[in-house]
Amino acid sequence: DTEVTQTPKHLVMGMTNKKSLKCEQHMGHRAMYWYKQKAKKPPELMFVYSYEKLSINESVPSRFSPECPNSSLLNLHLHALQPEDSALYLCASSQPPGRNNNEQFFGPGTRLTVL
Amino acid sequence: KQEVTQIPAALSVPEGENLVLNCSFTDSAIYNLQWFRQDPGKGLTSLLLIQSSQREQTSGRLNASLDKSSGRSTLYIAASQPGDSATYLCAVGPWGMLTFGGGTRLMVKP
């Protein structure tokens, strides 16, 4: 099974709302990622978790708060977002560093619209 | 900082043609290179992974090569089909920090 699932598929929120994006994988991967993709642009890395610990934060604003409660789950908590944060948010997973195969597998994404 | 460029940005071909998509990168100290396919509004589907010690990988009608010394990779698609229509992205990096190219939008016409 090479599937990464993400919920919800679509999310519309106001600038004062608090919401969360969820990602799950059952491939036994110990590295998980959040990417942001604007329309007609390539994905941009936001966060990397390795063995459930945050290892990379690409200078993402604090209104985005990641969480990795266990090796299969990854959350992205959203608070006080701006309209320019509207994008497709992609989750991915792979083996952690030191393993031979670091192929990243992506989920279908959550389409976020901030009003 | 790693920069990844994909040429051409868009490509339209009749069904059955063999295609070559190009990817170039500025920093040859890469961990691996991965090719993806993305359909409109969807997530990324991994096509091929080439680790830094490898020169090529093959999967079905797809063949990807890697030349680290020149900072280039090519994705070869044999006997293209309308179902191949999508955006193709290459990504390189050290572990965990993939940098993506801008993609090649491919249209295969019946």
Image (cartoon, rainbow, N blue to C red):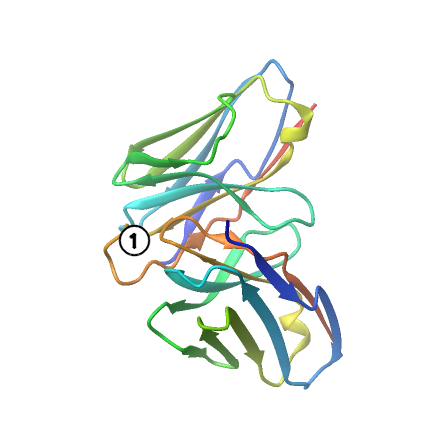
Residue B30, quarter of the rendered image: bottom left
Residue B23 spot, x, y in % from top left: 57, 67
Q: Position of residue A47 (x, y in %)?
A: 43, 37
Q: Residue at x 68, y 74 (%)?
A: B82
* Residue visible at 39% across and 63% down in the picture: B32
Q: Nearer the viewer, residue B15 or B5?
A: B5
Locate residue B49 relative to residue A113 in the image: left or right: left
Is residue B91 something one can see in this rendering? yes
Q: Is residue A77 above or below residue B30?
A: above
Residue B46 x/y as whole percent:
47, 62
Is residue B14 rendered to the left or right of residue A95?
right
- Residue A52 picture quarter: top left
**To which residue does mark 1 refer?**
A95
Q: Across the whole image, how many numbered discs are drawn on residues?
A: 1
Q: Chain of mark 1?
A: A
Query: Is residue B110 in view from this perspective?
Result: no
Q: Residues within 10 Å of mark 1 (few under 14, many from 20)?
A: many
